[in-house]
Each structure stands twice: as structure tokens, then as C-alpha cells.
């Protein structure tokens, strides 16, 4: 088979987009069914299908980039634009949650008793666990940048070390947030139903979900690095993961200032009156 005489890459027909949509549908439908008291088997099957699809699809893309040489400079440029547009769509995803939160916090409704946060809600202290998680994520942003610079300089040992530390920090962040949720003053599943817990958990919960996805993304890059993948001048797979991780960092800073500190300040003001 002769190689193409151009710098573009025309991808082969693939079943993975179709399979991934089916897997996501099964996972979502199973999750909704589980929340309504139906067996979680369908949700578990969907979760396994999503993981399998991710693995197989990433495997094919890795082969294209690392072994088949299809990701030439002009293809990498297209991939960069694609990743930028994806992150932009994620930004708008979080804008919707921030919009709902600010709408009710700035203009409290009758449903919240005319105050924000609603009476009887004990908010999180921003100087406690949220501060620890802020430090953890900011530190992880420096370690992933360290790994990126090490890779560009050809220092693979420092690249692996910096990336490994970033992954551990991502796992630590998830554990701290899980601990925070477990010991929350308001119960997500029913005792604290209402506008406040809905907007709070949507914003912080979906961010936590993105941290998990980013940690998986970086773990795949770490495993690829162990296998000798990535070159100083060609490593878009890792670069995209680093961009995504910095995006997660920035979103958390907005959450920490606007949500945790904003609620705490408002709660202190209500208490003072």
C-alpha cells in the first residue's frame, strides 16, 4: 500500500462513533432507571461499554499517530483547533450551571424564602476542604506544566515523574471532594432537596466528573509515555490532555471564588442581620 503524497489524513471508516453513542445511551438510560429504583445492571453494562469503547477508539487513534505516521503537522493543526472548540463547548456547558446559580443567588425567589442561601442550610467553609482542593489543583497545574516542558526538552524521566504526580494529585482531589460530599450538612438524595443543593451539586459535581475524566486522560498519556510514545516535537495527545487539565483548574477557581466564597459571604451576611 503506497503512502499518500499529501499532508492530510483521510480517516478510515470507523464504527466507534456509532458504538460510543449506543454505549452512552445505555449508560444514561440505565442511570435514570437506577435513580427510579430499577436494577443497576443496565447502568453497569453501559459503563463497561463506554470504557471498552474509549479503550478501543484511543487504541486506533494512537496507532494512527504513533505507528502509522498519519498525524503530520497540518493534521496536528486541525486536531488543535478541534480541541480548542471542544474546550469552548465545555466552557458554555459550565456557563449554564453558573448562570442558574447566579440567577437564584443574586435574585432570590419565594421558593428560597427570599434569601440566599435558603434558611436552614449550613454552607461549606471555604477555608476548610475547598481550600485544600484548590491548593491540590493549583499544584497539579504546575506539575503537568513541568511534565510538558520536560518532554519538550527530551527529559523523559522528569516527564514521567511530573505526569505521575499530576495523576496522584487528581486522585487526591477526587477523594477530598468525595469526603466533603459524604460529610455535607445537606443530603443530596432527599433531605436537602431544593434549588440550592441542585445548583451547588450540579456545578461542583460535574466539575468533579471532569477531574475524573482528566485524570483518566493523563493516565493514558502516562502509560503511553512508559511505552516510549511522544516525541519532543510531536506529542499532541499529551498536549491536549494538558490543555484539558488547565481548563479544569480554571473552572475550579471560578467555582471556589463564586460558589464557595460567594455562598459563605452571603450566609455570613444573613446571619449578621
Image: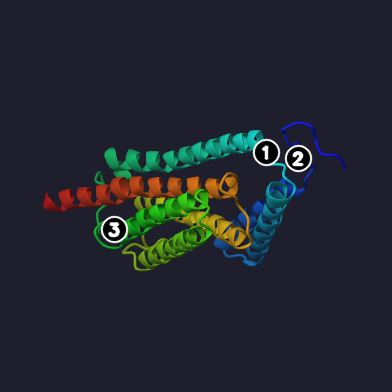
> In front of the other: label 1 or label 3?
1
- Tell me the residue at 26%/62% (across/down): 128
Q: Secondary structure at mark 3?
A: helix
Look at mark 3 in the image and give the residue it sits on: 131
Above or below for 177 versus 99? below
Look at mark 1 in the image and give the residue it sits on: 72
Would residue 219 be seen by someone viewing this image from the given angle?
yes
Reading the chain from its start, which is encountered first: label 1 or label 3?
1
Q: Quadrant of residue 45?
A: bottom right
Reading the chain from its start, which is encountered first: label 2 or label 3?
2
Q: Secondary structure at mark 1?
A: loop
Q: Position of residue 44 (x, y in %)?
A: 64, 65
Q: Position of residue 252 (x, y in %)?
A: 38, 50
> In front of the other: label 2 or label 1?
1
Q: Nearer the viewer, residue 39 or 27?
A: 27
Whether the residues at callouts 1 and 3 have beta carbons within 8 Å, the answer is no
Amino acid at each position: 500500500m503506497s503512502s499518500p503524497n499529501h499532508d492530510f489524513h483521510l480517516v478510515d471508516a470507523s464504527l466507534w462513533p456509532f458504538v460510543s453513542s449506543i454505549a452512552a445511551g445505555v449508560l444514561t438510560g440505565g442511570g435514570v432507571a437506577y435513580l427510579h429504583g430499577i436494577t443497576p445492571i443496565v447502568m453497569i453494562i453501559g459503563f463497561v461499554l463506554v470504557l471498552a469503547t474509549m479503550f478501543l477508539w484511543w487504541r486506533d487513534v494512537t496507532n494512527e499517530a504513533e505507528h502509522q505516521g498519519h498525524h503530520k503537522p497540518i493534521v496536528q493543526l486541525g486536531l488543535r483547533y478541534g480541541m480548542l472548540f471542544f474546550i469552548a463547548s465545555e466552557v458554555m456547558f459550565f456557563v449554564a450551571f453558573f448562570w442558574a446559580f447566579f440567577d437564584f443567588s443574586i435574585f432570590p425567589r419565594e421558593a428560597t424564602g427570599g434569601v440566599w442561601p435558603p434558611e436552614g442550610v449550613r454552607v461549606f467553609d471555604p477555608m476548610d476542604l475547598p481550600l485544600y482542593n484548590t491548593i491540590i489543583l493549583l499544584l497539579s497545574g504546575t506539575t503537568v506544566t513541568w511534565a510538558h516542558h520536560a518532554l519538550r526538552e527530551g527529559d523523559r524521566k522528569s516527564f514521567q515523574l511530573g505526569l505521575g504526580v499530576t495523576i496522584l494529585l487528581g486522585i487526591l482531589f477526587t477523594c477530598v471532594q468525595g469526603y466533603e460530599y459524604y460529610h455535607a450538612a445537606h443530603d443530596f438524595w432527599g433531605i436537602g432537596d431544593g434549588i440550592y443543593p441542585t445548583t451547588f451539586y450540579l456545578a461542583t459535581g460535574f466539575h468533579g466528573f471532569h477531574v475524573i475524566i482528566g485524570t483518566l486522560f493523563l493516565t493514558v498519556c502516562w502509560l503511553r509515555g512508559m511505552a516510549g510514545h511522544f516525541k519532543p516535537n510531536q506529542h499532541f495527545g499529551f498536549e491536549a490532555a494538558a490543555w484539558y487539565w488547565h481548563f479544569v483548574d480554571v473552572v475550579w477557581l471560578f467555582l471556589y471564588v463564586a460558589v464557595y466564597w460567594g455562598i459563605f459571604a452571603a450566609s455570613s451576611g444573613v446571619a449578621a442581620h
